[in-house]
Image (cartoon, rainbow, N blue to C red):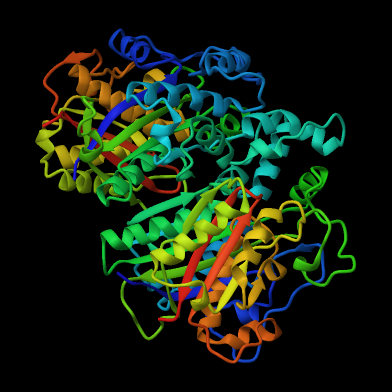
């Protein structure tokens, strides 16, 4: 059974001009030279009322906007399932509610931030916007969150061919969250000598945030961008050999060889210790294959691989979106997304020309 | 393809294991008491379904040494151990190919809320971020027991762990895995207590599900896990399953962020689809374990949906949240275990503190435990945000 990506949209640190569902011909992604990559939020007025905008968390706004942007029919599109992956939840609203508990000593609190802090608020709000009575679900397992949502989406399509599934991966960060991770020595202090993450020899990540949604179905349409298949998940591998064997096993399962991969989108964080096993495995498989280190464009967060999925689907349609980061002549056929989060959640996705 | 339940584990305010839970339910012993463990300004005067053990005591019961984990994780460990022991899966080799599908809403907030002020003040800081998020507990538990094949945490608010069970069933029915462990855990904490209180949904007194004069929920805490196995997995094992999971459905009410539609449309749809999957008629259900939170909105709308589907003669039904309180992310699984006990012991459990029915549907839950023939049990869970899930457990055919 083939699974098609029939719509894709994204909010990320990249320009809104290239992350909307309309694929712009002239604009490419850019690596951004800051230590934190905040999402460039669009103007929400077209799809969310000012009142609702005030009430909603950034996470919910990004989710609703992107979900609607993904659907060719917008708010009128009927989907059968809404499945999201979200690692951190509505972090900013959680901070606000928690702080209000402390400041007000548990008395007379406003409920809105509590409601907006829930991981499930995104899928719930989208179901409300679309009047979707179907299957709604949210996965919150760290760096596996998006791939598990993808797994569920494809399982749903396997059970119900012809159905339409709205799949999303999103996370937000806040100044306090950045400070918390900085206290744990997990964040890069400065950009330093290096231009790209893969060149960094220091510790710490460049944090980012963003939201990517996809419309999946078993039907090929004129809107089809690419095909996608079941991801692979690997938990805390002991060494890079385990990772390499796992990658080879995944490709074999899909009847392709390493030489058939036209581009690897790699989830290098630029944190030298964290990337150690990942880099060893990457170097053992990349050979002549071009590698794009996607966290240069979106930063690190639990569902960053959803950005890579979006970028892969876009690039298959139009490789020029990759700008100077992809120099080959040939069009992309097979893109392998190879990611890790915290050197614990390792994932693979295969996105292919339809 | 049949899905069998071969092990159950549970801890809540009415017992630390399935036997204690069963005894409390049959003997009508509520776990809802004045708050005594959580340090909150609402201690003593307000009530909740707390597990009456400190986290240090839970750590001992969980057989964990000196390791920094949250109360949510400890509750999960205890329930998990009971479930896999019963299913004969307590060695890592037997769990290597077994997904752990967990669920939570509170997660590590139960610890974070104690250390956040220090973080803001930049004094006496204690690291909390590693245990804060939803996924920590599942990662810890799966690493501890050796079930790393596929480990996830689902969060759809109050229906979360019903959805873990549904995912598990789907994995088995579609032959992705032969056996899975599914459930969830949530600890009682200030964040959720104040969250629901800010929505004016909490009753200061012990809650009264389905009663005309109900005033809201009591929160609870706990954990439950179920071992689901395929027929193939059972073959040659010599195991006798407790029951089967014969139907399920996940729908969305899509009406409002915090309220269910007046007809309980999403709940009605979930119950109906579950019955269709199980090839059953409403009359085949022997007991309904309702979501029954005791909010004005839920018990009205869920009741309307039950009345519409089951007509003049609904089966015995109850909300066991009158015993355990609302255990949020753990509720779906805790009530699934209670449904399994209902099948196993052929008893419909009572609804405490009910006296007058809600005029809109006039449904009357049973108020004492009823020994009766039960072929099928229906269990409902509804999560804030419109998430509706129903499960049907059946006697072995």
Q: Is residue B204 above or below residue B259?
A: above
Inspect this view and state whether residue A45 appears: no
Q: Is residue B65 above or below residue A215?
A: above
Inspect this view and state whether residue A25 appears: yes
Q: Is residue B112 above or below residue B175?
A: above
Q: Position of residue A169 (x, y in %)?
A: 54, 60
Q: Position of residue B196 (x, y in %)?
A: 54, 34
Q: Residue at x 55, y 90 (%)?
A: A330
Relative horizontal placement of residue B2, taking residue A130 as reference (left or right) = left
| Count of numbered marks | 0
Q: Position of residue B339 (x, y in %)?
A: 27, 27
From the viewer's side, name the closer residue of B101 and B290: B101
Which quarter of the rendering shows the C terminus of chain A?
bottom left
Res. B106 image quadrant? top right
Which quarter of the rendering shows the N terminus of chain A?
bottom left
Q: Position of residue B176 (x, y in %)?
A: 32, 50
Res. A306 image quadrant? bottom right
Res. B95 image quadrant? top left
Q: Residue at x 41, y 83 (%)?
A: A223
Relative horizontal placement of residue A126, taking residue A188 as reference (left or right) = left
Relative horizontal placement of residue B117, taking residue B144 as reference (left or right) = right
């Amino acid at each position: 059974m083939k699974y098609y990506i029939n719509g894709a949209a994204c909010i990320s640190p990249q320009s809104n001009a290239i992350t909307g569902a309309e694929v712009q011909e002239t604009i490419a992604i850019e690596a951004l030279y800051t230590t934190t990559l905040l999402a460039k939020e669009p103007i929400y007025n077209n799809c969310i009322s000012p009142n609702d905008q005030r009430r909603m968390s950034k996470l919910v706004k990004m989710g609703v906007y992107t979900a609607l942007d993904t659907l060719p029919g917008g708010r009128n599109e009927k989907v059968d399932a809404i499945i999201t992956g979200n690692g951190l939840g509505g972090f900013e609203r959680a901070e606000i509610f928690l702080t209000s508990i402390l400041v007000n000593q548990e008395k007379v609190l406003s409920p809105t931030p509590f409601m907006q802090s829930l991981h499930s608020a995104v899928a719930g709000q989208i179901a409300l916007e679309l009047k979707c009575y179907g299957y709604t679900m949210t996965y919150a397992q760290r760096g596996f969150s998006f791939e598990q949502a993808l797994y569920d989406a494809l399982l749903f399509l396997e059970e119900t061919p012809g159905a339409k599934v709205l799949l999303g991966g999103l996370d937000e960060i806040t100044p306090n969250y950045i400070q918390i991770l900085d206290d744990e020595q997990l964040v890069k202090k400065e950009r330093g000598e290096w231009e790209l993450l893969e060149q960094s020899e220091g510790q710490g990540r460049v944090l980012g945030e963003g939201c990517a949604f996809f419309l999946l179905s078993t039907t090929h349409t004129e809107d089809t961008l690419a095909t996608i298949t079941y991801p692979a998940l690997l938990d805390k591998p002991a060494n890079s050999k385990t990772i390499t064997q796992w990658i080879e096993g995944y490709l074999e399962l899909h009847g392709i060889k390493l030489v058939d991969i036209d581009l690897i989108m790699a989830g290098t964080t630029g944190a030298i210790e964290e990337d150690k096993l990942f880099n060893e495995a990457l170097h053992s498989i990349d050979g002549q294959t071009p590698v794009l280190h996607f966290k240069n464009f979106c930063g690190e967060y639990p569902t960053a691989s959803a950005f890579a999925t979006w970028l892969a689907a876009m690039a298959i349609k139009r490789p020029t979106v990759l700008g100077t980061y992809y120099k080959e002549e040939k069009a992309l056929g097979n893109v392998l997304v190879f990611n890790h989060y915290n050197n614990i959640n390792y994932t693979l996705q295969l996105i292919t020309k339809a | 393809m049949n899905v069998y339940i071969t092990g159950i584990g549970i801890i809540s305010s009415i017992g630390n294991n399935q036997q204690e839970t069963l005894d409390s339910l049959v003997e009508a012993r509520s776990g809802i008491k004045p708050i005594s463990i959580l340090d909150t300004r609402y201690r003593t005067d307000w009530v909740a379904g707390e597990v009456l053990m400190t986290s240090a005591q839970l750590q001992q019961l969980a057989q964990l040494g000196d390791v920094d984990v949250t109360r949510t994780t400890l509750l999960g460990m205890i329930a998990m151990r009971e479930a896999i022991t019963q299913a004969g899966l307590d060695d890592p080799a037997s769990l290597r190919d077994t997904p752990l599908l967990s669920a939570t809403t509170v997660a590590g907030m139960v610890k974070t809320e104690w250390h956040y002020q220090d973080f803001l003040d930049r004094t006496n800081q204690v690291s909390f971020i590693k245990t804060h998020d939803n996924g920590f507990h599942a990662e810890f538990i799966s690493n501890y027991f050796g079930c790393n094949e596929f480990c996830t945490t689902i969060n759809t608010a109050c229906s979360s762990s019903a959805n873990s069970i549904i995912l598990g069933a789907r994995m088995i029915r579609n032959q992705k895995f032969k056996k899975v462990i599914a459930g969830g855990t949530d600890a009682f904490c200030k964040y959720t207590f104040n969250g629901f209180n800010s929505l004016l949904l909490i009753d200061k007194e012990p809650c009264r599900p389905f009663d005309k004069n109900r005033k809201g929920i009591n929160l609870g805490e706990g954990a439950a896990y179920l071992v689901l196995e395929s027929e193939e997995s059972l073959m040659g094992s010599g195991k006798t399953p407790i029951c089967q999971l014969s139907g399920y459905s996940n729908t969305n009410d899509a009406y409002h962020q915090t309220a269910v539609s007046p007809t309980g449309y999403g709940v009605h749809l979930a119950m109906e689809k579950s019955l269709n999957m199980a090839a059953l008629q409403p009359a085949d259900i022997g007991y309904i374990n309702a979501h029954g939170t005791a909010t004005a909105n839920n018990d009205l709308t869920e009741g309307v949906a039950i009345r519409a589907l089951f007509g003049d003669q609904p089966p015995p039904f109850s909300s066991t949240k009158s015993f355990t309180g609302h255990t949020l992310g753990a509720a779906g699984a805790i009530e699934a275990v209670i449904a399994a006990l209902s099948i196993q012991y052929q008893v419909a459990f009572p609804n405490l503190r009910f006296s007058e029915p809600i005029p809109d549907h006039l449904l009357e839950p049973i108020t004492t435990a009823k020994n009766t023939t039960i072929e099928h049990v229906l269990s409902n869970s509804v999560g804030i945000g419109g998430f509706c899930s129903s499960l049907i457990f059946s006697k072995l055919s």
